[in-house]
Image: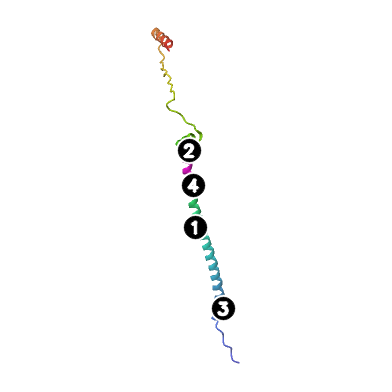
Amino acid sequence: MRPRRKRKKTFNRFKLVIPIAFVLAVMWVCKSNEADKLSRKLTELERTKKSIIEQHKLLHIELEKYRSIGWIDRCARQNFGMTYDVKKRIVLFDRSKEIRRQNRGLFASLGGFVSGIYKSLIK
């Protein structure tokens, strides 16, 4: 008998390469779609972050406005009628008290004692 011809093994290998390439292509497309979705979500989150930062800045400016003495004064005058008339103010000044130095000598002088009594009587 005649020996059979041996078939080439390349055709069998080619049959194996095509399904592997197809599976890899499908996996690549799925990962590409997932990466695109994550990229869009990241962009949306960055936009949200920027808008929140802008809102924070605006709220901080508004808070500083509400803390200012001028705004509080204007609000008290306009909304509640809390006004004050500068011309009708009465300003009282107290006499400043003199700081008396005590004589730390061994013998107190009679003149210092008499002058202290005289000053206390005048006041």
Q: Depth-wise, is mark 3 or mark 2 nearer the camera?
A: 2
Spatial CA distance of label 2 from label 1 is 36 Å
Kindly indicate whether the residue at mark 2 contacts the one at mark 3 (C-beta within 8 angstroms). no
Could you say whether the residue bearing mark 1 is in a helix, strand or loop? helix
Quadrant in the picture for residue 5: bottom right
Residue that label 4 marks: 56
Q: Is residue 18 left or right of residue 97?
A: right
Q: Where is residue 98 shown, x and y percent of the image?
A: 41, 17
> Which residue does the image show at 51% across and 55% down from the upper left?
45
Of 81 and 107, nearer the camera is 81
**Where 45 falls versus 21 (above or below)?**
above
Spatial CA distance of label 1 from label 4 is 20 Å
**Where 88 falls versus 58 (above or below)?**
above
Q: State which region is magenta.
A: 59-68
> Which residue does the image show at 57% across and 74% down from the upper left?
19
Could you say whether the residue bearing mark 4 is in a helix, strand or loop? helix
Q: Where is residue 24 shown, x and y percent of the image?
A: 54, 70
Rendered image: mark on residue 67: 2
Spatial CA distance of label 3 from label 2 is 78 Å
Secondary structure mostly taken by the magenta-highlighted segment of the chain: helix
Q: Which comes before the other along the chain, label 1 or label 4?
A: 1
Residue that label 1 marks: 43
Could you say whether the residue bearing mark 3 is in a helix, strand or loop? helix
Residue that label 3 marks: 15
Quadrant (top left, top right, bottom left, bottom right) of the C terminus: top left
Q: Depth-wise, is mark 3 or mark 4 nearer the camera?
A: 4
Amino acid beneath label 3? Lys
